[in-house]
Amino acid sequence: MSGGAGVPAVAPGAVRVGIHDLAVATGHHVLDLDDLAARNGVDPAKYHVGLGQDAFSVPAADEDIVTMGAAAALPLIERHGTDGIRTVLFATESGVDQSKSAAVVAHGLLGLPSTARAVELKQACYGGTAALVAALGIVARDPRERVLVIASDVARYDLDSAAEPTQGAGAVAFLVAADPDLIEIEPASGLFSADVDDFWRPNDRSTALVDGRLSVSAYVDALLGSWDDLADRGGIAPADIDRWLHHQPFTKMALKAHRAWSKHVGAEFDETELATGFTYNRRTGNSYTASVFLALAALLDLDDDLDGRRLALFSYGSGSVGELLTGIVKPGYRALRRAGQVAGLLDARVPISVDDYRELHAATSTSSEARQNPAVTTGPFRFTGVEAGARRYARTEPTPN
Ligand code: HMG
């Protein structure tokens, strides 16, 4: 249903579009990287300082990208209703079906109107930003519409691999709307695509293959390439960007790339400036498509001085695509934040031992064999099991009126 109460009527062409509200969800368990370091015989400083990570989220056996994505979106539906939502875009690279989109399952779990399109998008970690850009276009075309974007992923690498400490899980959902309350996205962006085999997951694997060193340089190339493209399109002076947010496969990656950018443009930067945006990602690990938006959530929650400030959001998806977007934070954003909510969510995760994590890791959640999953999660949705090859989900608490 479009055109309901509270949906702005703005003439196409004059419309300002952006992120109206956003919310976060993650997995039920948390693995402390000190425990993994002890198991792997590694100095914990390698993880905390060398990679810039402290822990990672581990989904329970009855959680997956759908349950996390729907859990992130639920508070948005509770706060804003469904008026105007005619599109649900679900970005993920840990998809659970090759045909049916996670968007249509989340759409059902959230009780969204049948008068909405539901689609899944994929290009590694870039998918969430691809969904944002598509949503901006949909709303610019008809400002009465709102788009629900869900970015949700479980990052899985082989046990005992160099990439193992950079796993993680998380979801961010956001509403894209005209005259947004949080961030107005500016029209120009910088783009960079190159066909690189730095990280990929063939159809017969549940863990990614990665050339770690190549992935680091490919990420840096994409940031510099995106910056140069934005510069060629009119650009923004480095000094006119107030805060930077990057995709964070591990937070040190963002730092490394930003150092390279600062050398590239000849700008000084204080490395502590990036720390606020690292706050949640240090604790969740890589959440792939959701990662840059988790950084945004941290900044909005924890930085009190963002009124009218310009943010730069750099998204990188292996393979590879980079995009650099900018946006202006709306004055009054502080009144909209839910202080301590995400920290509470992260604190509430249940610690998991290395042995139990390894056991969960070995169980392939994408199998289509019939099963019933144990009831573990305390989140609002469960992946209850598989019947006749189809994944089944359920709400764990009654839908609010
Ligand atoms: P590694 O074997 O841990 O590398 O693999 P390392 O031995 O070079 O150590 C890492 C850092 O720890 C180094 O710092 C060491 O000096 C430091 P750096 O030189 O890089 O600044 N270190 C220590 N520091 C303090 N105390 C110590 C200590 N020991 C060592 N005692 C690698 C690292 C990133 C390759 C691995 O974790 C990996 O393969 N990760 C997965 C790939 C990845 O995340 N790539 C990032 C770019 S690609 C991307 O972002 C896309 C992605 O999200 C997927 C998608 O798009 O879908 C991954």
Image (cartoon, grey):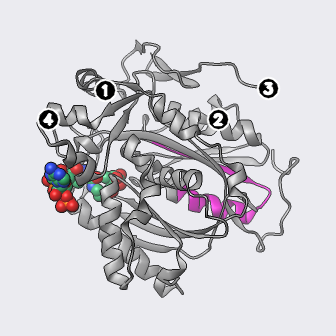
Q: Are marks 4 and 3 in contact (CB under 8 Å)?
A: no
Residue at the outermost right position:
5
Q: Are marks 4 and 1 in contact (CB under 8 Å)?
A: no
Q: Residue at x 62, y 72 (%)?
A: 186
- The residue where tag 3 is placed is 401
- Cα separation between marks 4 and 3: 49 Å
- Looking at the image, can residue 114 be seen? no
| Label 1: which secondary element | loop
The earlier-in-sequence mark between 4 and 1 is 4
Residue 364: numbered disc: 1
Density class for disc 4 (Cα within 10 Å; few <14, some 14-19, many ≥20) is: few
- The residue where tag 2 is placed is 74
Going by the numbered disc 4, the residue's amino acid type is: Asn
- Looking at the image, can residue 309 be seen? yes
- Cα separation between marks 4 and 1: 23 Å
Q: Residue at x 42, y 77 (%)?
A: 227
The earlier-in-sequence mark between 4 and 3 is 4
| Label 3: which secondary element | loop
| Label 2: which secondary element | helix
Does the residue tagged 3 have its C-beta within 8 Å of any atom of ligand 1?
A: no
- Cα separation between marks 1 and 2: 27 Å
Q: Are marks 1 and 2 in contact (CB under 8 Å)?
A: no
- The residue where tag 4 is placed is 40
| Quadrant in which residue 60 is drawn | top left
Does the segment drawn in magenta span residue 151?
A: yes
Q: Residue at x 44, y 80 (%)?
A: 229
Q: Nearer the viewer, mark 4 or mark 2?
A: 4
Going by the numbered disc 2, the residue's amino acid type is: Leu
